[in-house]
Amino acid sequence: MSQFADVVNKLIPNLSEFAGNDLPVHTPIDGSLLTTLRCHTSIEIDALIAQSQTAFKAWRLIPAPRRGELVRQLGNKLRERKEDLAQLVTLECGKIIEEGRGEVQEMIDICDFAVGLSRQLYGLTIQSERANHTMQENWHPLGPVGIISAFNFPVAVWSWNAALAFVCGDSTIWKPSEKTPLTGIAVQNILNEVLADFPDAPAGLSQLIIGRAAEGNQMVEDTRVPLISATGSTRMGRIVGPKVAARFGKSLLELGGNNAIIVTPSADLDVALPSILFGSVGTAGQRCTSTRRVFVHQSRFDQLFETLKSAYLQIGASKIGNPLEASTLVGPLIDEEAFTCMQNAIEAIRPHATEVVGGERVLSETGGYYAHPALVKINHHHEAIHHETFAPLTYVMPYSSLEEVLEVHNSVPQGLSSAIMTTDLREAEYFKQNSDCGIANVNIGTSGAEIGGAFGGEKETGGGRESGSDSWRAYMRRQTSTTYHGTQKPALAQGITFDV
Ligand code: UN1
């Protein structure tokens, strides 16, 4: 692929340093082999964790606003490299170029956010029950932060974690998805350019582990890494979470979703339709926030299903295809396994479905796994749709009462993102109070969150919060400090007398 050589020249001129025979990297665009990399050995991983610990000890002493300056420069470097990095994201994970650019923009945005944060990181002062005592809550840097990211947001998720970790005074160790290690190397190079002119940053502040689950696992089990922030499938989180807990580490898990949109009788369909389409079809259904379920009030069900169906049928050959082309809206699935999962999910629901639109493989002659997005009409919520299928597969079903539909909405094991389409204030507020998800939107779809909010969800989604709001607290150590500044014998709390 000619674009690949070009973009590698610009972003990874040192690719030969990573070459080996362990990890083949394919582009989902046509399935061709881009390169083969060497995985880090256990001894190397041990050494880079040790370096990260040493780097942390130096970095935590740098004033937070100065640490923010590093992140400010990283954001600027990303602005310069935005187009090249977006191209590499598209080549390696297959998302359309417009979304590749959006992903790099998300990195820039979180850098800006973190720069402001570097002058905040506020603690509390607390009223003491005793005279001449002051109480404070202090936030201290935590240590090396282990970052595990998934193929679908190969660079943005690193930046959500790393930008916050850096301003909080932490070092980072990143294990990108084995499906997208090249974007990891490219980002590390971009950061290295900034670090080269930033003398206060210690060597080894940002480490990269190339490998599969076994290599990531070494970091997960290492007590020198106090926080593991893992984004990916619930299956992965079920392995990582208990392992980190067993060594009393902290984990920040952002796992699978089963996100739904509820379309009420008062919904404005001009608002609802684009949100349903982008949520279901965007990123070829490979976002953790993608729309998997659509509940439509029975009074509007037939009309909405037919409108959606005709939109799906229009997503023909001209809209599915090479994600580097500006006119493409639906790129390939990441690999054959993803396509097989989609087919299995369609076959599992077919006996219970009234209608299935799309779902078939297209453009097979390219060698990539391109799927026509699938829309499945069902009468009732069914057990078969309780799991997440990471593909453009959306189930549409009718409902009659908002109370009942929220019960059904919440009946799945995941709790990431949710949305209601309504012009009725009471419905909107009822929805926000009763959706059990970490994200509950009104007249906005389930995907495409801004970085300013805390991102993550409940239940099998893992409970962690990344990115905006006060997510930074996960990257720091909280300390309560009481100081006595009187001259008499100090009083004990709770009024206890203890005279010897
Ligand atoms: C993911 O799919 O893991 O809200 C992250 C969104 C994006 C992030 C998705 N900002 O859809």
Image (cartoon, helix red, strand yellow):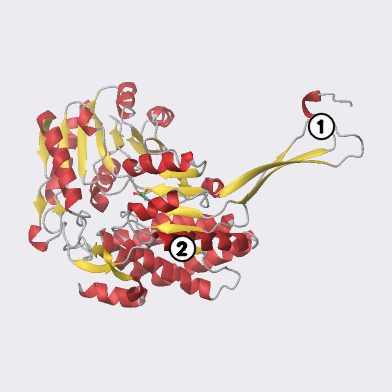
For label 2, the residue is 207
| Res 272 → quadrant | top left
Residue under label 1: 130
Give the residue type at disc 1. Answer: Arg
Q: Is mark 2 within 8 Å of ligand 1?
A: no
First of labels 1, 2 by sequence position: 1
In the picture, measured across the screen, residue 367 lies left or right of residue 2, that is left
For disc 1, the neighbor class at 10 Å (few under 14, some 14 to 19, many from 20) is: some
Along the horizontal axis of the image, is 208 left or right of 150? right
Q: Amino acid at mark 2?
A: Gln
Where's residue 349, x and y in %?
15, 33
Q: Are marks 1 and 2 in contact (CB under 8 Å)?
A: no
How far across and down, in percent of the image, does residue 45 sit?
43, 60
SS at circle 2? strand
Q: Which residue appears at 35% of the width and 52% of the height?
A: 214
Instruction: Name the quadrant of the N terminus.
Output: bottom left
The reply to whether residue 79 is in sight is no
Seen at 40% across and 61% down, the residue is 209
Q: Is residue 293 above or below residue 85?
A: above
